């Protein structure tokens, strides 16, 4: 079966069926799209369904809040967020969702320290709001980690979240 891929901008809960894809992939800008290709490839290779949306924490905070707070209801189980510069996207998603969030710091021509700006923005989350941070431009590892999280199944009842 072909993995489900949604590449249109997120337009609201009503547009989706009850069972969405297992992995949500978000990026903060169209300019981030290419750097996330290894994650899409890895999920395709593993036959894991995903959706892909461009949603900026700074330019479209309401859209990010809507996506993050409804993803679990649609069946998404892990969210991967790629962002560069002041990379707020993974942290904001983690603040609106109890799903595991994996952040991918992205390097761009505007980066400070070759992506160190994004790495610190993603990794330095306050206690109680975790984001798993992979290496700079580590999109493939984000997908591998997502697969490993999915493989764990539901061992913990929701009241423990
Ligand atoms: C971040 O700002 C995005 O994730 C992107 O990496 C960076 C630059 O965005 P653009 O100016 O290219 O849209 O929010």
Image (cartoon, rainbow, N blue to C red):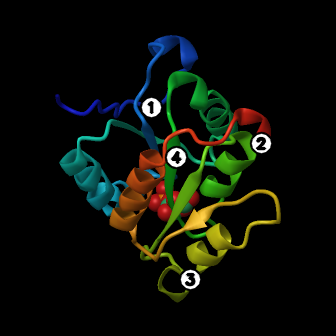
Mark in front: 4 vs 2: 2
The disc at residue 79 is 4
Quadrant where the C terminus is found in the figure: top right
Say whether disc 4 or disc 2 marks the residue closer to the N-terminus.
Answer: 4
The location of residue 134, given as percent across then percent down, is 49, 71
Q: Marks 4 and 3: CB-CB under 8 Å?
A: no
Judging by the rendered image, the residue that carries numbered circle 2 is: 160
Q: Is mark 2 within 8 Å of ligand 1?
A: no
The location of residue 102, given as percent across then percent down, is 53, 58
Q: Residue at x 58, y 64 (%)?
A: 132
Judging by the rendered image, the residue that carries numbered circle 1 is: 9
Mark 1 and mark 3: Cα distance apart in space:
28 Å
Depicted 116 relative to depicted 64: above or below: below
Is the residue marked by circle 2 packed among few (<14), some (14-19), or many (20+) residues within 10 Å? Answer: few
Judging by the rendered image, the residue that carries numbered circle 3 is: 116
Mark 2 and mark 1: Cα distance apart in space:
32 Å
Number of residue marks: 4
Say whether disc 4 or disc 3 marks the residue closer to the N-terminus.
Answer: 4
């Amino acid at each position: 079966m072909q993995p489900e891929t949604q590449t249109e901008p997120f337009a609201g809960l009503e547009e989706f069926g009850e069972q969405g894809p297992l992995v949500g992939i978000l990026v903060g800008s169209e300019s981030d799209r290419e750097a996330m290709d290894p994650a899409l490839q890895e999920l395709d290779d593993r036959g894991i369904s995903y959706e892909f949306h461009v949603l900026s924490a700074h330019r479209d905070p309401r859209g990010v809040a809507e996506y993050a707070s409804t993803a679990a209801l649609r069946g998404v189980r892990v969210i991967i967020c790629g962002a560069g510069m002041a990379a707020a996207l993974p942290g904001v998603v983690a603040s609106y969702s109890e799903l595991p969030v994996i952040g991918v710091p992205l390097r761009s021509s505007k980066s400070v320290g070759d992506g160190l700006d994004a790495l610190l923005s993603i990794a330095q989350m306050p206690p109680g709001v975790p984001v798993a941070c992979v290496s700079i431009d580590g999109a493939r590892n984000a997908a591998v980690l997502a697969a490993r999280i999915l493989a764990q199944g539901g061992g913990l009842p929701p009241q423990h979240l």
